[in-house]
């Protein structure tokens, strides 16, 4: 069975398990919220032998009650599973405790793609850790088409994490230029929080790794023209230039991120070159599956006949054969940092710093790069 089909089955099974676990977790959360909503200030007051006003002061951190009384009330409230009413909390804090997440995936891979599923799950986890819910932002409300900003207004979100989008889309620009706090992942806007993968370092490390094994005929298939692609191309060309490696323009090819089909087609074209490259860099680990299939269909072997390098470091890269040499991005760190910084801006708008944060990764050596110096 081709690698791509095996991979598809693997991802579909994983997605089914993820959805089932999500359903179980959601059911648990609903039951806990239903139980908590049954506990009132009056219940806590009766248990503690104080007035409801005193309970309210303790729960809201007001200073005019004794510390011993406050601690006792908080302990009893915790034992009873008390949870503040969201509507009441929103009225008091002027916040909805709801964060919008904009995730636009043109390949429709969604949660089936391990990199983005990790990013999105880390956003959810960090938001929940701070007491926030998340809402996915889109262009539709039922049968009505809206802009991203209109959807955010309708849902009353406190801020937005843009995890993936067409950053040239006027609706994205409108959202970013609004008064809502925004944090972007892998793209920079002026006066906005940006959390970025270290694409320069990642590509530099991969080039130097394969060059150390004697490779100088290196082809690169990159993704669409985005800031991520610009960073990786810069890192690639800079490292090649410093190492004295000349790369023909015909070996630099534009593909599509997370698309094995297009990657397979480009790989076949590269293999038809009479003076073909000894190593191909693929735009990401998932797309690499298409390239590996094309190599296999051509009657060639990795790494014996041609070497392959991926990007992202998703778990899939560790279970294919041979194990893929790749750059592991910290997908969990990207989502976690972006969400934490956004919440900081929401809760402390006067002191939060709207800067750029670099989240680095690490090279993962596999068995997909041949050492040409051992000939």
Image (tube, rainbow, N blue to C red):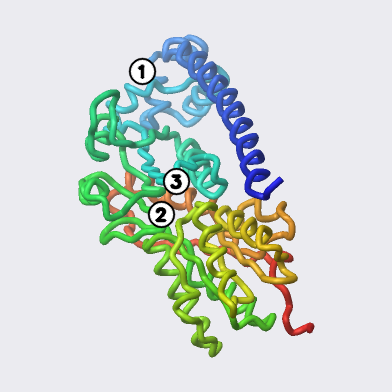
Q: Secondary structure at mark 3?
A: loop
Q: Left or right? Give the position of 343 relative to 110.
A: left
Q: Residue at x 42, y 15 (%)?
A: 41
The image's mark for residue 107 is 3
**Residue 160: percent from left, percent from top:** 34, 43
Task: Classify 147 as above or below 39.
Answer: below
Ranked by sequence position, the earlier of labels 2 and 1 is: 1
Q: Categorize mark 3 by other alpha carbons within 10 Å: few (<14), some (14-19), many (20+).
A: few
**Residue 39: percent from left, percent from top:** 47, 13
Q: Left or right? Give the position of 302 relative to 102.
A: right
The image's mark for residue 53 is 1
Residue carrying label 2: 185
Q: Nearer the viewer, mark 3 or mark 2?
A: 3
* Residues at circles 3 and 2 in contact by the CB criterion of under 8 Å: no
Q: Secondary structure at mark 1?
A: helix
- Between 251 and 83, the residue placed more toward the observer is 251
Q: Categorize mark 2 by other alpha carbons within 10 Å: few (<14), some (14-19), many (20+).
A: many
Task: Classify 137 as above or below 185.
Answer: above
Q: Residue at x 68, y 59 (%)?
A: 296
Task: Classify 289 as above or below 76.
Answer: below
Q: Secondary structure at mark 2?
A: strand
**Residue 115: percent from left, percent from top:** 54, 50
* Residues at circles 3 and 1 in contact by the CB criterion of under 8 Å: no
Instruction: Tell me where residue 305 sits by quadrant.
Output: bottom right
Instruction: Tell me where residue 186 sits by quadrant.
Output: bottom left
């Amino acid at each position: 069975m081709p690698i791509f089909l095996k991979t598809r089955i693997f991802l579909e099974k994983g997605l089914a398990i993820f959805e089932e676990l999500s359903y179980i977790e959601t059911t648990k959360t609903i039951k806990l919220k239903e139980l908590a909503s049954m506990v009132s200030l009056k219940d806590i007051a009766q248990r503690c032998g104080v007035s409801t006003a005193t309970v309210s002061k303790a729960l809201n951190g007001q200073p005019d009650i004794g510390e011993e009384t406050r601690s006792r009330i908080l302990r009893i409230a915790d034992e009873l599973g008390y949870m503040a009413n969201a509507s009441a909390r929103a009225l008091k804090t002027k916040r909805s405790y709801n964060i919008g997440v904009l995730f636009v995936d043109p390949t429709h891979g969604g949660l089936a793609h391990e990199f983005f599923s990790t990013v999105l799950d880390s956003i959810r986890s960090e938001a929940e850790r701070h007491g926030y819910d998340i809402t996915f932002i889109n262009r539709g409300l039922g049968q009505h088409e809206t802009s991203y900003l209109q959807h955010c207004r309708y849902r009353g979100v406190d801020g937005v994490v843009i995890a993936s989008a067409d950053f040239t889309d006027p609706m994205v620009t409108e959202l970013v230029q609004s008064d809502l706090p925004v944090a972007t992942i892998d793209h920079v806007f002026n006066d906005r929080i940006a959390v970025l993968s270290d694409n320069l370092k990642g590509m530099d490390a991969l080039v130097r790794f394969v060059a150390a094994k004697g490779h100088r005929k290196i082809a690169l298939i990159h993704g669409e023209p985005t800031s991520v692609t610009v960073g990786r191309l810069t890192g690639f060309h800079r490292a090649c230039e410093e190492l004295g490696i000349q790369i023909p323009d015909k070996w630099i090819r534009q593909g599509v991120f997370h698309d094995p089909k297009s990657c397979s087609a480009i790989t076949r074209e590269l293999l038809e070159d009479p003076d073909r490259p000894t190593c191909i860099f693929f735009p990401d680990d998932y797309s690499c599956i298409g390239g590996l299939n094309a190599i296999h269909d051509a009657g060639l072997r990795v790494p014996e006949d041609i070497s392959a390098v991926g990007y992202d470091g998703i778990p899939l890269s560790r279970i294919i054969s041979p194990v893929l040499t790749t750059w592991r991005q910290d997908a969990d760190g990207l989502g976690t940092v972006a969400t934490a910084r956004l919440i900081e801006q929401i809760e402390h708008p006067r002191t939060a710093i709207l800067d750029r944060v670099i989240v680095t990764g690490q090279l993962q050596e596999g068995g997909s790069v041949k050492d040409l110096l051992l000939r």
